Structures are given as structure tokens and as C-alpha cells.
Image: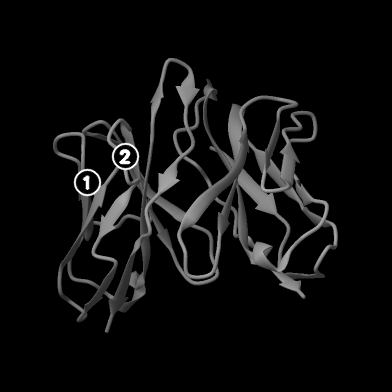
């Protein structure tokens, strides 16, 4: 397994356009997280999935943001009507949970979004 | 939910100096505790972890001990190298003994090591 992979690595879009990012977690991991990181800050939690179920969404996640994990494997994060304030690094992470056990989260390289 | 407070940076040290980066957390139950590191231009990597009280995590010469009584997880290294220059994040996360569902990150501590 090559770890968590994210696509694309970079995205430049015009304000008002929609963008979609993809994350492929480590194959045996049942939990998948999305975070956002801006320059000089730590990652901020956006949402997470346990298998295909989206169990928690941050208040940071406005109605313009939607995430899916339809088959409990890869996930997509869509941002509609992008704004300049959406410019950030979007990070995906995965972990394995169950039976009083939680592994650490393994992070992808991220997708850097620039809204112009 | 969990929260974390870590030492503000930037921290600048000379090579071979002793490093401490303080971290305290608040949590319901007993979270797992992690230190992640982000080298320039790279993604987040796990540096070390501890999953229960009094556990010591260690990796690459770094150590941190899970102190339940003081809710702390301070990062230490006896002799830093230029290659340790990075941003370090303390992060409590889910465990089998915590209701927390996600890893919460501090603001990070930027470490710069002078040759």
C-alpha cells in the first residue's frame, strides 16, 4: 500500500466555480477524515466517515461544502461557488478503528486550493 | 471535546541543544496522544505516539511521556540537528477509552535549528 493519496495536488480555480477533490485512504482503514490547513495554522477538522457513514461535520463546513464516501473506500470533497477564503490546503487522513483500538491517522500530501 | 495547548513558536536553537516543546490537553476520558511533524514542503507525518498513561513514545531521538495527572505530553530531544527544523503538532486523538472521534491539532510550534 502506498499510503493515503489525494488528487489533484494543486488546484487553481476562479471564484464562483465548483471544485472536487478525491482521497484514496489506506485500503484496510475504515475511518476517513478531511481537514483544512491555512498558512501558519494547524489542521482544522472538517468532517469524518466511518465506512460510508458521515458521522460528524464541523461548523466550519458551510452548506457549500459536501463530502461523500459512497462505498466506504475513496472519498470526495466538493466545494461549490468557491470563495477566496476557501484557499487552503485540504488534507485527507485515514485510520483503523474497532474493538477498543484506534490507530493513528495517516495523512495524504494534501490538495492545495487557490481561488483567484 | 478534546482541546490542546502547545508552546508557541518560533523556537530557534543551535545544533546539539536540548529541546522541549510543551503540550497540555483537555479531554474526556483517556485519549491517545500524538506528535505529528511537518517538514518544509511535506505532508504531516506521525513522529511518535502514546496510548495510555505513563507510556513513553519515542522516535528519531524524540521522546514524550503521557502524563495523566498533569494532562501533558511534552516533546523532548537531547541533541537537535539542523534536519529537525520543522513544524511540530501535539494532538490528542481517539482511543478505546475516550469518546473523542477525531484528532485535534494545536497551532503548531515552528522549530528552526542553526548549524
Residue farthest toward the bottom in the current orientation of the protein? A116
Q: Position of residue B13 (x, y in %)?
A: 80, 69
Q: Nearer the viewer, residue A17 or B44?
A: B44
Label disc, if present, on residue B68 of the rendered structure: none
Instruction: Decide which of B61, B64 is in the foreground and name it.
Output: B61
- Please state which of residues A47 and A63 is positioned toward the viewer in this rendering: A47
Q: Earlier in the sequence, mark 2 or mark 1?
A: 2
For the point 85% across and 62% down, the residue is B17
Tell me the quarter of the image containing the C terminus of chain A: bottom left
Which quadrant does the N terminus of chain A fall into?
Answer: top left
Q: Residue at x 44, y 33 (%)?
A: B101
Q: Is residue A20 left or right of residue B24?
A: left
Q: Position of residue B5 (x, y in %)?
A: 68, 51
Q: Quadrant of residue B48 in the image?
A: top right
Mark 1, other Cα within 10 Å: few <14 / some 14–19 / many ≥20: many
Q: Nearer the viewer, residue A16 or A68?
A: A68
Closest to the camera, between mark 2 and mark 1, is 2
Q: What kind of element bears circle 2?
A: loop
At 32% across and 46% down in the image, what residue appears? A2
Is the residue B60 above or below the residue B19 in the image? above
- Residues packed near mark 2 inside 10 Å, few (<14), some (14 to 19) or many (20 plus): many
Residue A26 numbered mark, or none: 2
> Is the residue B29 above or below the residue B27 in the image?
above
> Is residue B28 in view?
no
Calculate the distance from the C-alpha at mark 2 to the C-alpha at mark 1.
12 Å
Residue B55 appears in the rendering: yes
Which chain does tag 1 point to? Answer: A
| Residue that badge 1 annotates | A75
Is B25 on the left or on the right of A52, as rendered? right
Amino acid at each position: 500500500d502506498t499510503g493515503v493519496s489525494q488528487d489533484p495536488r494543486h488546484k487553481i480555480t476562479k471564484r464562483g466555480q465548483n471544485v472536487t477533490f478525491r482521497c484514496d485512504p489506506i485500503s484496510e482503514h475504515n475511518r476517513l477524515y478531511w481537514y483544512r490547513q491555512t498558512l501558519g495554522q494547524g489542521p482544522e477538522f472538517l468532517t469524518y466517515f466511518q465506512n460510508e457513514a458521515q458521522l460528524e461535520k464541523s461548523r466550519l463546513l458551510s452548506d457549500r461544502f459536501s463530502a461523500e464516501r459512497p462505498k466506504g473506500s475513496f472519498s470526495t470533497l466538493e466545494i461549490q461557488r468557491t470563495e477566496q477564503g476557501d484557499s487552503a490546503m485540504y488534507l485527507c487522513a485515514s485510520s483503523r478503528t474497532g474493538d477498543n483500538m484506534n490507530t493513528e491517522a495517516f495523512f495524504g500530501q494534501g490538495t492545495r486550493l487557490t481561488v483567484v | 471535546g478534546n482541546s490542546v495547548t502547545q508552546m508557541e513558536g518560533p523556537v530557534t536553537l543551535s545544533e546539539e541543544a536540548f529541546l522541549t516543546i510543551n503540550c497540555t490537553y483537555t479531554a474526556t476520558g483517556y485519549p491517545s496522544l500524538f506528535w505529528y511533524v511537518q517538514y518544509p514542503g511535506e505532508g504531516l507525518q506521525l513522529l511518535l505516539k502514546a496510548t495510555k498513561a505513563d507510556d513513553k513514545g519515542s522516535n528519531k531521538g524524540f521522546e514524550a511521556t503521557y502524563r495523566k495527572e498533569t494532562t501533558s505530553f511534552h516533546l523532548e530531544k537531547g541533541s537537535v540537528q539542523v534536519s529537525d527544523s520543522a513544524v511540530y503538532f501535539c494532538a490528542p486523538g481517539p482511543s478505546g477509552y475516550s469518546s473523542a472521534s477525531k484528532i485535534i491539532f494545536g497551532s503548531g510550534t515552528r522549530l528552526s535549528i542553526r548549524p
